[in-house]
């Protein structure tokens, strides 16, 4: 399951996100999204977990809880929408 994690602290790194979710099961990947131009965190990320039961447990446990001074949002990620037009 792919999990969206929002309201991340801007100082959080991929490893911080991975460690947080590993408390609830095996993490396949954890990535904080960064702005390409500034290399600064955008304040959200994605975690992939292979076991849906563990992923749902992590979502239930972490959604609305504080992490590094911020109240997290965690839910199953929606499929990425296709963008039209050229990329610059």
Image (cartoon, rainbow, N blue to C red):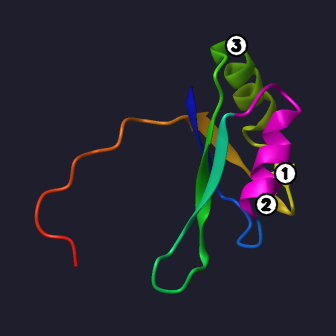
Residue 88: give x, y in percent of width and height: 22, 79
Q: Residue at x 67, y 47 (%)?
A: 30
What is the secondary structure assignment of the residue under circle 2? strand
Give the main secondary structure of the magenta stretch: helix
User: Which residue sits at x=82%, y=55%?
Assistant: 16
Q: Which mark is residue 66?
A: 1
Element class at badge 1: strand
Q: Is residue 63 visible?
A: yes
Specify the segment rendered in magenta.
13-27
Q: Is residue 38 above or below residue 35?
A: below
Residue found farthest to the bottom: 38
Dot placed on the residue nearer the N-terminal end, 1 or 3: 3
Q: Position of residue 8 (x, y in %)?
A: 70, 60
Residue, disc 3? 53
- Please name the residue shown 67% across and 34% down the image: 28
Q: From the viewer's perspective, is the residue at label 1 or at label 3 nearer?
A: 3
User: Where's the N terminus, which quadrant?
Assistant: top right
Residue nearer the viewer, 42 or 64: 42
* Mark 1 touches mark 3? (CB < 8 Å): no
Please state the horizontal and vertical placement of residue 81, each as a whole percent of the image: 27, 45
Numbered mark located on residue 70 in the image: 2
Badges 2 and 1: C-beta atoms under 8 Å apart?
yes
Answer with the quarter of the image where residue 12 lies.
bottom right
Q: Is residue 14 left or right of residue 43?
A: right
For marks 1 and 3, give the CA distance: 22 Å
Residue at the location (83% across, 35% down)?
22
Q: Is residue 82 magenta?
A: no
């Amino acid at each position: 399951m792919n999990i969206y994690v929002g309201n991340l602290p801007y100082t959080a790194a991929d490893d911080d996100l991975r460690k947080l979710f590993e408390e609830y099961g095996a993490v396949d990947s954890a990535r904080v999204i960064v702005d390409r131009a500034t290399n600064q965190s955008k304040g959200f990320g994605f975690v992939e977990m292979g076991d849906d039961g563990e992923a749902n447990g992590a979502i239930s446990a972490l959604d609305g809880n504080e992490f590094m001074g911020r109240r997290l949002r965690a839910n199953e990620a929606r499929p990425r929408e296709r963008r039209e037009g050229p990329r610059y």
